[in-house]
Image (cartoon, rainbow, N blue to C red):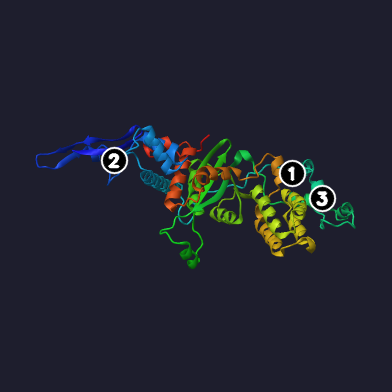
Amino acid sequence: MKAYPVDGEVGRFSFDTYSLINVNGEEWYNTAKEFFPPLQGTERYRTEGFNEIALIYGVTEGSFRKTSKLINRVRHQEEGGTPSRRLNDHTENEGKQLQKYFEEKTESILEENGFTSEGPPEKLLIDNFSSIALEDKDLENLINECAIEKQVKDSLIKNPIAEDEDPENLINECAIEEQVKDAIIKNPVAYENAEQTVHISLDDVCTKQQKETRKSKKQENSNGKTRQYVQNTVIHVQKGENSYLLNGHGVIWTLKLLLAFLLNNHLIGLNLVFFVDGHSLYSTVILFFAWHNKISVILDWFHLEKKCKERLSMALKGSKIRNGVLEKLMPLLWHGLVDEAMDYLKNLPQELIRNEEQIQSLIDYLEKNKPMIPVYSIRKRLGLRNSSNRVEKANDLIVAERQKHMGMAWSKSGSVALASLTSIKKNQEYKKWFHERKIEFKLAS
């Protein structure tokens, strides 16, 4: 007979276990092993209620110390209650089990659908991108509705301080209106049919990584090493009104998880429109889904705008000049006129520029990201998304809000574990996980 320790929502307690021994002294049955999960060392069995209170309503919202103090106070066990260190270990262990479950589920789904390390099955045929049926005439009407001509006319004045020439005459002489319409119509980023599309927002968020050993600042400086970070990749998947959050360590693994999710929800044959905030994610997505013919990647508008503001702040002489240049640059990019935007930057007067390298850096950025810069104005008019703000919000909820304050640092396993628990909380999957150790892995409304 041995006491079996339990951490429950009503408190910490233990109860006796029993063994059935035959006449030869052999153990036939032991309730501590057969009826309840076997424990090791100082580990305790945790009830579903405790898991829900401590993990879902506790450590995913507040620190381990505060959670420990609160649950022990509610259970009237300030002395001998659950210590914060034990909550930390429990969170990491639970997160590891979740990640292992997702890994096994992912491998199982991919294998069932014929995917191997070599790629997708040959029988998998993905039709062409299902876009909105727009004729040139329809696009021209949309262009007129967006009042593009006036905005672009104002933006295509090469010299923002020129006074000796009439910009309107210059524009008319160059037949810019027709050129602009042609450029907008030829923009390569398609206008997807929303009913046949899965919208996927993808982003990385980094938290400070714990050091294996503590070192003095003098030692850190002498080593010349930069601070290490733990990378969490978060993906927001949306089909119509339904959505789901995925997370993992590293972009490749999380994209693999995404592929399994799409297959499990029978979404793989639809348009896959990704929203990202940079070229590195664009390249990774394109390579990973190179076999899929219905892929489109769009650069988040707010990130593009932010990048332009930051670069021009460092490049130009003062905020007044920067704002004047932005007034002409951003309408060009809003209408998908990347070549015209780069030409405008190349022709800025030298007397306005403080740092030529920053201007060139912005031009290089636009050139590199050109394949995923759509006509944002037309997309907005069609009711299509231009932003990855859903995953930005998801990042805040899953990682940043809990892990990026007051100089906190995390181990790789600890950071991903806590993010995984927060994900099943947001997906409303935690009750099934604690009760059955399974996840639905289905789009939630």
Which residue occupies 76% across, 50% down?
Answer: 327
Front-most of residues 410 and 98: 410
Element on which disc 2 rests: loop
Name which residue type carries label 2: Pro
- The residues bearing labels 1 and 2 have C-alpha atoms spaced at a distance of 65 Å
Image x and y of residue 141, in percent:
78, 41
Which residue occupies 68% across, 39% down?
Answer: 383
**Residue ranking furthest to the bottom:** 222
Element on which disc 1 rests: loop
Circle 3 or circle 1, nearest the eye: 3
Name which residue type carries label 1: Glu
Characterize the local packing of mark 1: few (<14), some (14-19) or many (20 or more) Cα atoms within 10 angstroms: few
Left or right: 188, with 435 as reference point: right
| Residue 154: mark in rendering | 3
Position above or below: 216 against 95: below
Image x and y of residue 308, in percent:
69, 54
| Residue 37: mark in rendering | 2
Q: Which residue is mark 1?
A: 135
- The residues bearing labels 3 and 1 have C-alpha atoms spaced at a distance of 27 Å
1 and 2 marks in contact (CB < 8 Å): no
